[in-house]
């Protein structure tokens, strides 16, 4: 990581939001010599991070940086500047410095060996305590009054006037874990522009037959390739009662969401055997199946699991010719009819528009207020890209605070 600046005089900075971005900003500010106070409205910190870590905490990705940067869509130039400041290698080093060994999975994703977030969060909180960072839970920010930050606490209302503030309140997904987007009107009242929140990394509705839905909901489609338009994503998809979700879907969710919003439906094709050519499948399917049912034949000679076979039938009667059936396996058509809401989304798009902050992530409309993480209007697929950019934006915002405060001395 690049050399970090320090404050020339002692200052007090409040950080609002104790998720990954808020805690990272607090750590960097404390390292620079600031007195740091963190506020979070929930009874405990890092709830969304801890929930995400239950299935294995995907920290970042090991792919080459030039490919890594393409994951941020229209926000790529801005996100690339953040990640240049705090790279995937920096993030991995930081995690290991907290005593949490990491490893790279077969997909290139980086995880802690513990495969969960709780040991990392415990070590991190111990470091912050040693740095003198104060954390106030059940401290809900409710905007400004006469230039002061207003907090609702169990002991009543508190007004605070720090030298600077970092807002890291998250977007609007998983609101029960703390990020409900309630802050948007308060920033708009200050002159900031906030793009409407939209679900990202989210599942889509499919009109399954009742038989398919009841039998296969919760079953994965492993190692598939999903195509929408000219984009293809490989990974796993998961059949849900409402439709379909999973990493391969999330990688296309921004484009799929836009298509559903504008056309009220989106078409995808699922390649159930992306590593096997049509010709090879045709040869396998041409083998005599004797008394075996077609479903058993597909499982035996093609290696399709029951859910994948059933998905073929969902698309209509199966073609009789081996070639046409092979082509169906390589491109199962599926119509998406709707998008799941923010309450089911892993992350959200929308938030403070990127043109509304400077290169230090300070609000143009409100000097001294800095914004980090998912409060900003960017999105990325799962796979480590969300956490990486959240952490990196926090470093940029914290160092922006340091630069701004020193410029005022």
Image (cartoon, rainbow, N blue to C red):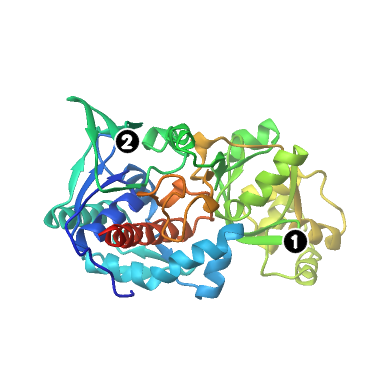
One can see residue 41 in this view: no
Mark 1: give few (<14), some (14-19) or many (20+) Cα within 10 Å: few
Q: Position of residue 91 (x, y in %)?
A: 35, 67
Looking at the rendered structure, which numbered label has been put on residue 230?
A: 1
Q: Residue at x 20, y 65 (%)?
A: 8
Task: Tell me if I can see residue 304 in this picture.
Answer: yes
Mark 2, secondary structure of its residue: loop
**Considering depth in this image, is 284 or 246 the residue closer to the camera?**
246
| Alpha carbons under labels 1 and 2: distance apart | 50 Å
Q: Is residue 30 left or right of residue 143?
A: left
* Image quarter hosting the C terminus: bottom left
Seen in the picture, residue 143 relative to 391 is either above or below; the reply is: above
Question: Quick one: which residue is furthest to the top in this view?
Answer: 156
Mark sitting earlier along the chain (1/2)? 2
Vertical comparison of 319 with 181: above or below: below
Question: At x 39% / y 51%, what residue is drawn?
Answer: 55
Q: Look at 68% across and 65% down and name the residue there.
A: 274
Q: x and y percent of residue 339 in the render?
A: 63, 38
- Which residue was labeled with disc 2? 147
In the displayed structure image, the side of residue 89 where residue 256 appears, left or right: right
Q: Is residue 226 above or below residue 179?
A: below
Q: Is residue 138 left or right of residue 353?
A: left
Residue furthest to the front in view is 409
Label 1: element kind: loop
For discs 1 and 2, the disc positioned in front in the rendered view? 2
């Amino acid at each position: 990581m690049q050399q970090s600046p320090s404050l020339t005089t002692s200052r007090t900075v409040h950080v609002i939001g104790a998720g990954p971005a808020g805690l990272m900003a607090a750590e960097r500010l404390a390292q620079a010599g600031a007195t740091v106070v963190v506020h979070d409205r929930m009874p405990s910190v890092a709830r969304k991070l801890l929930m995400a870590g239950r299935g294995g905490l995907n920290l970042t990705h090991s792919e080459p940086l030039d490919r890594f940067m393409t994951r941020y869509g229209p926000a790529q130039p801005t996100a690339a500047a953040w990640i240049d400041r705090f790279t995937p290698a920096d993030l991995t080093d930081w995690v290991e410095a907290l005593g949490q060994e990491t490893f790279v999975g077969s997909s290139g994703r980086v995880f802690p060996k513990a495969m969960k977030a709780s040991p990392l969060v415990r070590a991190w909180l111990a470091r912050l305590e040693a740095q003198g960072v104060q954390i106030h839970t059940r401290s809900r920010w409710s905007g400004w009054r006469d230039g002061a930050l207003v907090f609702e606490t169990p002991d009543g209302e508190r007004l605070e006037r720090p030298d600077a503030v970092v807002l890291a309140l998250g977007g609007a997904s998983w609101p029960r874990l703390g990020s409900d987007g309630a802050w948007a009107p308060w920033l708009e009242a200050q002159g900031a522009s906030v793009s409407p929140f939209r679900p990202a990394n989210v599942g889509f509705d499919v009109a399954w037959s009742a038989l398919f839905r009841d039998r296969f909901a919760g079953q994965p489609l492993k190692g598939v390739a999903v195509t929408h338009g000219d984009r293809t994503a490989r990974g796993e998809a998961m059949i849900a009662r409402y439709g379909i979700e999973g990493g391969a879907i999330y990688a296309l969710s921004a484009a799929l969401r836009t298509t559903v919003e504008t056309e009220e439906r989106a078409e995808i094709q699922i390649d159930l055997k992306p590593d096997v050519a049509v010709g090879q499948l045709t040869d396998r399917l041409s083998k005599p199946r004797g008394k075996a049912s077609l479903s058993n034949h597909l499982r035996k000679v093609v290696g399709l699991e029951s859910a994948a076979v059933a998905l073929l039938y969902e698309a209509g009667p199966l073609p009789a010719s081996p070639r046409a059936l092979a082509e169906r396996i390589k491109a199962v058509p599926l119509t998406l009819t709707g998008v799941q809401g923010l309450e089911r989304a892993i992350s959200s798009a929308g938030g403070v528009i990127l043109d509304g902050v400077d290169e230090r992530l300070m609000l143009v409309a409100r000097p001294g207020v800095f914004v980090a993480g998912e409060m900003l209007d960017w999105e990325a697929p799962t796979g480590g890209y969300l956490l990486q950019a959240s952490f990196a934006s926090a470093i940029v915002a914290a160092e922006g605070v340091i630069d701004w405060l020193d410029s005022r001395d």
